[in-house]
Image (tube, rainbow, N blue to C red):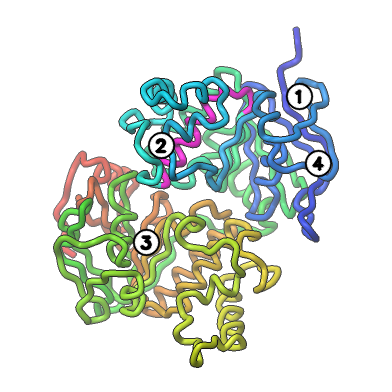
Amino acid sequence: MPAPASLSCRDITKRFDRTLALDRVCFDVRAGEVHALCGENGAGKSTLARVIAGVARPDSGEIFLDGARVEITGPARARALGIGIVFQELDLFNGLSIAENMALGHPRAEKAFVNRRALAAWSRPFLRRVGLQNADPLAPLAAQSIATAQLVAIARALALDARFLLLDEPTSSLTEDAAGHLLALVAELRAAGAGIVYVSHKMREIFRVADRVTVLRDGALVSTKNASGTSMDETVSLMVGRALDTAARIATTPRADIALEVENLCTRRLKNISVRVRRGEIVGVAGLVGAGRSTLGKALFGMEPWTGGRATLAGARFRPRSPDEAILAGLAYLPEDRRGQGLFLQTSVRHNASAAILCRLRRGPFVRRWQETKLVRDELEKTRAKIPSLAAPVSALSGGNQQKVLLAKWLLTRPALLYLDDPTRGVDIGAKADVYKLIAGLSAAGAGILLASSEMPELLRLAHRIIVLHEGRVTGVLDAATATQEEIMSLATGMREIKTQE
């Protein structure tokens, strides 16, 4: 009987300048299994996946496929060997359609590239498999949400019919229902004989789908265990080197005065949204993909035109026509897509963190650099960000540290109201705990917070109340201390609606 197919890495080492990203790491995945790869941001997970997929070349080490040594000289060579990857930071093109993005790099589909009808027909079966059966394959990707774009990237990987599939944070932008659909698809691929490398910070997902779990820390292999022979708590402890409380509610007491009051806000996608946030209160915003969570944040930040409604912020009339007006009024907005909408990737950490307060730092036409440096350094220390230098390009940081730089940027504005759109997307469990402490600290200091999240446990842990959106309108408001995930889901799917007083 032949040995099962396998993909094996031996003693993989990779450096980026002075940083040792991978230190003689050994790792393998077998056909018909899901092997989870865990670790904090910067542990080396994505680097290892990129090495296997031919995107990065190792400094030393070997890769074996079915027992034979192979040279993976680039992504095309990896695809030819049957290795596919879905990146955490999506490699898609907003200027192309959904189907055109799927066709890039696919030898058969590229022949139909100029035939739009053939291209749409080719792409539809793969879109259905990831739950996008209602998507128009010829629609521009730029018009889609980041969650839809993530599913498009997964559909593209399925189209390649890879024997080994690397999924790097595949559910980071997905709601619970979409994530559940994807996990069922992963199980289906495993049953069909594919080998899946599953990179994620979400412990519940890992222990729902994985056969084995490997932990990396600081570029080194810590352990590889059968999922049935370990636990979430043990895995977290191995990842961060310390125990973390991942379940307890973070309790703060809201104040009586109102930070933000919105009445009957309407946009092209929102219908009569009303919400009140007291100072020191965290109000969660729940809803499925397309429900309007991100649209609400953009409307409050002056990025989405209002067609009706009224609002007050810190007691003053509030209807921003641009982000500048929103910032001056005291509202900050942390977007879901930090790389596409939140950061200037090729500029320094210092410039990114100070971008929203330059008017405070100017003396005539010049910026007071000493003051900028001090303010940024002090704020980053509060976030526990691991930054090699304030002059380093923010693109060189891990996802968790990029998110902390973005948080520091908005904390420096001292906002009266902070809208956080999936603030822990793609962030490791240690960095997530740091972000939770920051949110609790802001709440305790009196800031009002609207927290939109695709993770219901996050909302139940952090929020005082939760508003649930369905197709652009509020279907209910729940007390987070007594709410359940089932209640949130029934409201989010439109199965029921409750009228709750603010």
What element does badge 1 sit on? strand
Using a 10 Å C-alpha cutoff, classify the residue at mark 1 as few (fewer than 14 neighbours), some (14 to 19) or many (20 or more): some
Farthest residue, direction bottom: 363
**Which residue is under mark 2?**
97
Q: CA distance from mark 3 to mark 2?
A: 31 Å
Q: What secondary structure prevails in the magenta region?
A: helix
Could you say which quadrant of the image residue 28 lies in?
Answer: top right
Q: Is residue 42 visible?
A: yes
Q: Position of residue 138 (x, y in %)?
A: 36, 32
Label 4 vs 3, first from the N-terminus: 4
State which quarter of the image contains the N terminus. top right
Reply yes or no: does residue 432 show up in magenta: no
Q: Which residues are magenta?
A: 146-164
Q: Is residue 419 above or below residue 114?
A: below
Identify the element where label 2 is drawn. loop
Q: Which residue is mark 4?
A: 12
Q: Is residue 126 left or right of residue 312?
A: right
Q: Amino acid at mark 1?
A: Leu
